[in-house]
């Protein structure tokens, strides 16, 4: 991509490099809207550089939803799916080449949005759901001839909105198993979407979202993938300040294995200790 990018990569910290990469993806996306082919090689370069930076300081992956904004949601979402997908693959002991493949596939999963009417990416509303169901097919067509991406990752791009119980889209045979890349990108996609601010939906805390994925959507996502992401959050958020749904500010003081979405917290004002695993009325609304 040229010496300028190499110098930028060396000099910027993860946050600045991530934000620069989002703007680069935005420029590429505008080109795709104008009819250009997907620059898979450039996406590969960006995602490998970002993954390498992220894995030096893994806590960065847990902050991605804070950077997202309504106006640039589509571009943040693409980069974040890639980074979260690559991180999950890493934590699942995939080799580094497959970690990069998961990151590249995740980033390109929504490239087909560029083939839809621009209004859908400018201000997506709940009423537009039906129309956007074709975007995985467009994404697949845009990358299917690339020699850079593994075939299993191309399939993952096509079916990242599929679910293990045969629901989701595009429609597929229930007897067809989803490969690991498909399972990883599906979780990365829904997790970032639900934790991000969007035009028609407020963001929710990672703990609340993971609880919903585990329980409300049980059977739709691969439990190993979900628990891999969940354990990663548990490892990094001890000591973090959070806001509860009753408005209290608290600190996470203990996270029990098997109950990661409902840690033990200490309320800052009263120093009251609350086990959210027992007190089911309360939940973490926001990580501060």
Image (spheres, rainbow, N blue to C red):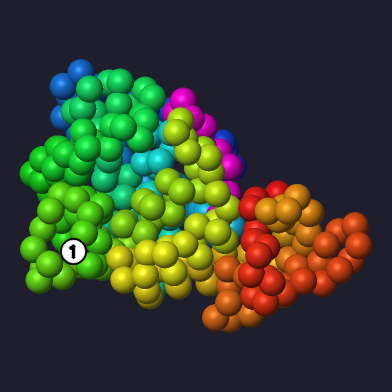
Q: Position of residue 189 (x, y in %)?
A: 36, 51
Q: Position of residue 158 (x, y in %)?
A: 17, 50
Residue drawn where x is 65% and y is 58% of the image: 284
Is 254 above or below relative to 194? below
The range drawn in magenta is 62-72
Left/right placement of residue 108 relative to residue 201 reads: left
* Outermost residue to the top: 34
Q: Is residue 69 magenta?
A: yes
Q: Is residue 135 above or below residue 171?
A: above
Look at the image and say whether residue 147 sits in the magenta stretch.
no
Instruction: Find residue 25 and report its image quarter.
Output: top left
Do we see residue 113 in this rendering? yes
Q: Which residue is mark 1?
A: 166
| Residue 100 in view, yes or no | no
Total marks in image: 1
Q: Residue at x 53, y 40 (%)?
A: 202
For the residue labelled by badge 1, is the local secondary structure a helix, a strand or a loop?
Answer: loop
Rendered-image quadrant of the N terminus = top left
Tell whether 66 sits left or right of 272: left
Q: Residue furthest bottom?
A: 257
Q: Which of the pair 95/91 is nearer the observer?
A: 91
Residue 221 percent location from the top left of the image: 32, 66
- Please determine whether, in this image, residue 119 is positioned above or below residue 148: above
In the rendered structure, the answer to whether residue 238 lies left or right of residue 159 reads: right
Q: Residues within 10 Å of mark 1 (few under 14, many from 20)?
A: some
- Residue 28 figure quarter: top left
**Which residue occupies 37% across, 74% down?**
223
């Amino acid at each position: 991509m040229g010496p300028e990018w190499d110098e930028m990569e060396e000099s910027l910290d993860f946050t600045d490099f991530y934000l620069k990469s989002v703007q680069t993806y935005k420029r590429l996306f505008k080109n795709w809207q104008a009819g250009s082919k997907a620059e898979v090689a450039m996406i590969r370069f960006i995602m490998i550089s970002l993954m390498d930076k992220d894995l030096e300081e893994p806590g960065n992956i847990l902050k991605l939803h804070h950077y997202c904004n309504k106006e640039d949601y589509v571009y943040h979402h693409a980069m974040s799916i890639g980074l979260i997908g690559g991180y999950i693959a890493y934590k699942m002991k995939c080799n580094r080449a497959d970690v990069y493949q998961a990151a590249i596939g995740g980033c390109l999963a929504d490239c087909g949005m560029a083939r839809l009417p621009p209004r859908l990416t400018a201000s997506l509303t709940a009423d537009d759901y039906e129309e956007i169901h074709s975007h995985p097919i467009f994404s697949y067509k845009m990358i299917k001839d690339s020699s850079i991406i593994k075939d299993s990752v191309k399939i993952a791009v096509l079916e990242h909105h599929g679910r293990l119980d045969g629901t989701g889209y595009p429609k597929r045979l229930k007897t067809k198993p989803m490969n690991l890349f498909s399972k990883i990108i599906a979780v990365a996609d829904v997790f970032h979407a639900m934790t991000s601010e969007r035009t028609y939906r407020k963001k929710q805390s990672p703990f609340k979202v993971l609880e919903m994925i585990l329980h409300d959507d049980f059977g739709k996502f691969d439990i190993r993938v979900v628990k891999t992401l969940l354990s990663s959050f548990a490892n990094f958020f001890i000591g973090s300040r959070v806001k509860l749904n009753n408005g209290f500010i608290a600190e996470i003081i203990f996270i029990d294995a098997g109950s990661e979405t409902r840690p033990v917290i200490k309320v800052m004002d009263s120093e009251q200790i609350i086990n959210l695993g027992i007190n089911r009325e309360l939940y973490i609304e926001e990580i501060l």
